[in-house]
Amino acid sequence: MAFLTLEALTRIYGDVAAVSDVNLSVAKGEFISLLGPSGCGKTTTLQMIAGLVEPTAGRIMLNGRDITREKPDRRGLGIVFQSYALFPHMTVAQNTAFGLEMRKVPRAERETRVSQALALVQLSAMAERYPRQLSGGQRQRVAIARALVIDPPVLLLDEPLSNLDAKLREEMQFELRGIQQRVGTTTIMVTHDQGEALSMSDRVVVMEHGRIKQVDAPYRLYENPATPFISSFVGKMNRLSGIWCAGRVEIAGHVLPCAGFGLADGDKAVLSIRPEKIALAPFGRGQLDGRIKGRFFLGSSWFFTVETPVGVLGVSQPNLGVEPVGEGTQVALDWSASSARAEKASAAQPAAEQLL
Amino acid sequence: MSGARASWPPNWTPWLLALPGTALFAALVLLPLALTFALSFHVYDPATGVQDQVTLAHYIAVVTDDYFLTIFWRTLRLAALTTLICAVIGAPEAYILSRMRQPWRAIFLLAIIGPLLVSVVVRTFGWSMLLGPAGLINDAFRFFGIGTVRLLYTETAIVIGLVHVMLPFMVIPVWTSLQKLDPMVEAAAWTLGASRFTALRRVVMPQVTMGLLSGSLVVFGLSASAFAMPALLGGRRLKVAATVVYDQYMNELNWPLGAAIAIIVLVVNLIIMLAYHRAVETRARRTLG
């Protein structure tokens, strides 16, 4: 049974719909990410759940209770703000205890729960420090402890990692997911970083222009993006337009193998293939010949841009410890028919936006 | 900066840049103050004027005379009351202002600062017209059956006038310190179960302590030395420190006594402000850094 339900949730500012008709059911203990570019309505959705923004229409149900019009201080949800919003004049322990104080928890119990929460985020030694004496990662963990100590039914995270540097962000991704799994709190995270959303969530909700575009497990979302927008927003994607013909896509005289969906012969089709699904082969021995235009070393992998008769394609290859072919080399691109998808080209979403 | 080479020859630029300001300050503040201080120790003879002999008689006369002590006490009381009322009105005003959206914020900010563009004397006469027995306020009182209330030439009138003049000096520092506060901090308090009022008291108020402190110091200092407001709204009978100094200089021509009063007011003012500053700041610094 759904623990938290959003029903036709809508928020209109002036004559602009920031969020329109958002429907979502979240199961108990689930980790959900709201993913989308800035201005897609994901933060507004989170703030409506938190009670900081009032919905124009729709309903929010929490554990069978309608909380749509409830004040934020009555909802009891744990929220980690993008800026962390710690109380600067209180110590780490006082910050963490604030929610318990508001709930009139007796002092002895309060102290036990605060020290448990700080132990959970590994900040026991910092209890008497002030937020200004902490690093960004430590502040973020105080914000998590402060939100979790009140045992909230739902934890809301608003871009929790965006203020951290790249290395710390990666560490905190795993740590945050670990904490969430240990505590088992139902969590909704807002992020614009697809890597974060994919690595941490049970399900990812992709939003665009205030609407939900797709809700799926990270792996399925990556492999079966519902729209061209999602395919290019989540991961990288090569997209080529051509004509569907006898189970293949024909582009400028080249016939490319792929799996087609809902296509009839002669339809205009868009072929999508991820860079890591393409292999480099010796010239003349693949699906498509080309010439290496650019080569970029990314540590764990190499990224190539390859000039072909149908356009420039991106190709990603794992770093196997051997220096691969250099720029200017004639190569062939090879892939299996099942790893490329062909779909009907919609008038609204022309295949013009290419990888590079 | 290592060794003698870096500090020799000395770098004169900062000194040169500070020179005009220092010279102005010395000529217009320190020198007159020193002269006043010296003057307060001179003997005064009603027949022949200021003498060359040195005496403490003026100070002794002032601190032992009930007439002056009453005036000092009134000055401090009125300044403290004005400061308190300004804080009570100004802090919420600044909070509301900081939560306003443009263009309302700019309009209201202008409305708060606007009065500073009008001369204090003009505003004071405006208040005399409003507060007088035939003024608008007494008209209203009569209309509602309260009857005529004596307002002009009372301490109430002085406080009303001072609050009006001093309010911007309280609103602006508090508003500035609110600008530095992340609005999400207040939202965080709500989501943790704090009511609007509790969030204000526990989270917002401690953050604006420093703004409230500097506002209070400015308002108190200016109120305690205000001249035009007490002189015009308090009348000839209700004297404060500034008006009594004026009387000694201009009416009694006893400049040394006037100087002694001025010095005493300055010292008392300084002691009160420093003590207050220290009390509030040490508390705030401990937590705000």
Image: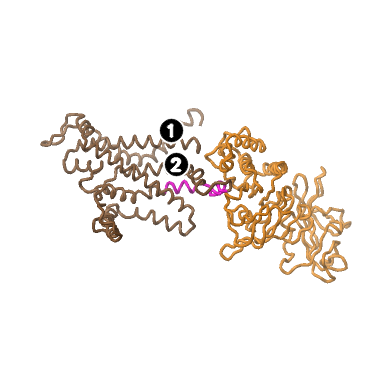
Chain colours: A orange, B brown
Please, what secondary structure does the residue beneath circle 2 have?
A: helix
Amino acid at circle 1: Pro
Res. A299 visible in picture: yes
Kindly identify the residue that appears in the image at 62 percent across and 39 percent down.
A138
Q: Is residue A11 magenta?
A: no
Distance of label 1 from label 2 (alpha carbons)? 37 Å
Task: Name the foreground residue: A59 vs B103.
Answer: A59
Q: Which residues are magenta?
A: B172-190
The chain to which mark 1 is attached is: B
Residue A254 placed where, x, y %? 84, 65
Residue B28 horizontal side relative to residue A282, left or right: left
Task: Name the foreground residue: A261 vs A2.
Answer: A2
For marks 1 and 2, the one nearer the N-term is: 1
Would you name the residue on which mark 1 appears? B10
Task: Name the foreground residue: A351 vs B204.
Answer: B204
Residue B276 horizontal side relative to residue A52, left or right: left
Q: Say which quarter of the image contains residue A234.
A: bottom right
Label 2 CA crowd tier, 10 Å (few <14, some 14–19, many 20+): many
The mark tally for this picture is 2
Res. A170 visible in picture: no
Residue A182 placed where, x, y %? 72, 41
Please, what secondary structure does the residue beneath circle 1 have?
A: loop
Q: Is residue A37 above or below residue B288?
A: below
Which-is-in-front pick, marks 1 and 2?
Answer: 2
Q: Is residue B186 magenta?
A: yes
Furthest residue toward left? B47
Residue A329 placed where, x, y %? 82, 53
Furthest residue toward top? B3
Q: Is residue A236 above or below residue A243?
A: above
